[in-house]
Amino acid sequence: MPTTSATSTASLLIPTPDGKADAFAAFPDDGERHPGVLMYPDAFGIRPVLREMAQELAGHGYYVLVPNYFYRHGPAPLADLPEYIGGEARSALIARLMPWIEAHTTEQILRDADAYLRFLADRPEVAAGPVAVTGYCFGGLLAVRTAVAHPGQVAAVAGFHAPVGADGPDSLRRLTARVHFGHAATDLTPEDLGELNQALDAAGVDYTSEIYPGTVHGFTMSDTDAFDASALRHHWDRLLPLLDRALTDKG
C-alpha cells in the first residue's frame, strides 16, 4: 500500500510523573502540522516492525508517537529480541514479560496517557484538535483506556488482537470516540463477538468490530509466527478510513 509522503523519525523522551518514557515518532517530512496518533505497541515493544508501521501511517499524513510503556523497567528493548519471534522464543518472551504486564496498573496507564497526550498537544509538528489512539495486543487495552479517559481529546480508537472488552460494558459505555476492533479468530468466538458488539450497540458507539478470518493472536506483526499478510492489509483498510473520518476532511 503506497504512502503519500516521505517521513522523518525521531527518538524521544517523554516526561511523566514516574520518570521519562522513551518513545519513537514518525511524521511527514513536509514541515507542516498533522493530526496526532498515539500508537501503543504490543508487549514486545518498540522494534523495527513497529517503527515500520509508524512510518507507514505517518506517510498518510499523521504524526505517530510510539511509547515504551514499560519504561519503568528500562528503555526499549527490554528483552533481547530475535529478528523473528516464533516457537519457543515467543513463549519464553511472553513468560518474561507477563510480570510486567500484570504489574502495569490502570493508574499507571492513565498517568502515562495524560503525559503522552500532553506531549502530542505541545509538539510543533502536531495539528491542533483531537487525536487518535491505536494499539496492538496489550497495547489495544491501553488504547481503549486512554480513549475512555479522554473523551474530549480522542476522536478515534482502534485495537487489534487486543483484550478491548476486558474492562466490561461500563467502560465501553464511556467511549465517545469512533471505534474499530479487529479481533483474532483465536481470541474471540463468534458468540463472544456478538456479546461485545451488543454492548457497543447498547452504548451507542460508532464502531466496526469483527473477527479477521483465519487469524491468530498477533496477526499484524510481521516479525512473529502469528503474522498474516492479508490480515495486515485489512487492518490498514480499516484503520486509515477511521482516521480520515475522525481527524481529517477526507472521510
Image (spheres, rainbow, N blue to C red):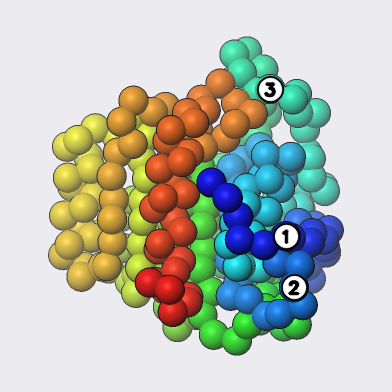
Disc 1 versus disc 2: distance between alpha carbons?
A: 8 Å
Percent coordinates x, y for residue 199 in the rendering:
20, 58
The residue under the point 51% across, 37% down is 220
Q: Determine whether, in the image, residue 49 is placed left or right of residue 216.
A: right
Judge the density around disc 3: few (<14), some (14-19), many (≥20) Cα neighbours within 10 Å: few
The residue under the point 51% across, 57% down is 134
Name the residue tied to disc 2.
Answer: 30
- Dots 3 and 1: beta carbons under 8 Å? no
Residue 108 visible, this angle: no
Q: Which of labels 3 and 1 is toward the front?
A: 1
Residue 67, placed above or below residue 234? below
Judge the density around disc 2: few (<14), some (14-19), many (≥20) Cα neighbours within 10 Å: few
Percent coordinates x, y for residue 178 in the rendering:
35, 68
Name the residue tied to disc 3.
Answer: 84
Residue 228, placed above or below residue 106? above
Pick out the residue farthest to the top: 88
Along the line of sight, which residue is nearer the eye, 220 or 7? 7
Secondary element at tag 2:
loop
Q: Which mark is residue 192?
A: none
Q: Which mark is residue 6?
A: 1
Q: Determine whether, in the image, residue 157 is placed left or right of residue 129.
A: left
The residue under the point 33% across, 36% down is 212
Identify which amino acid the numbered label 2 is placed on.
Answer: Asp
- Closer to the chain start, of discs 1 and 2, is 1
Percent coordinates x, y for residue 67 in the rendering:
69, 57
Disc 2 versus disc 3: distance between alpha carbons?
A: 34 Å
Identify which amino acid the numbered label 1 is placed on.
Answer: Ala
Secondary element at tag 1:
loop
Q: Determine whether, in the image, residue 94 is placed left or right of residue 218.
A: right
Q: Quadrant of the C terminus?
A: bottom left
- Dots 1 and 2: beta carbons under 8 Å? yes
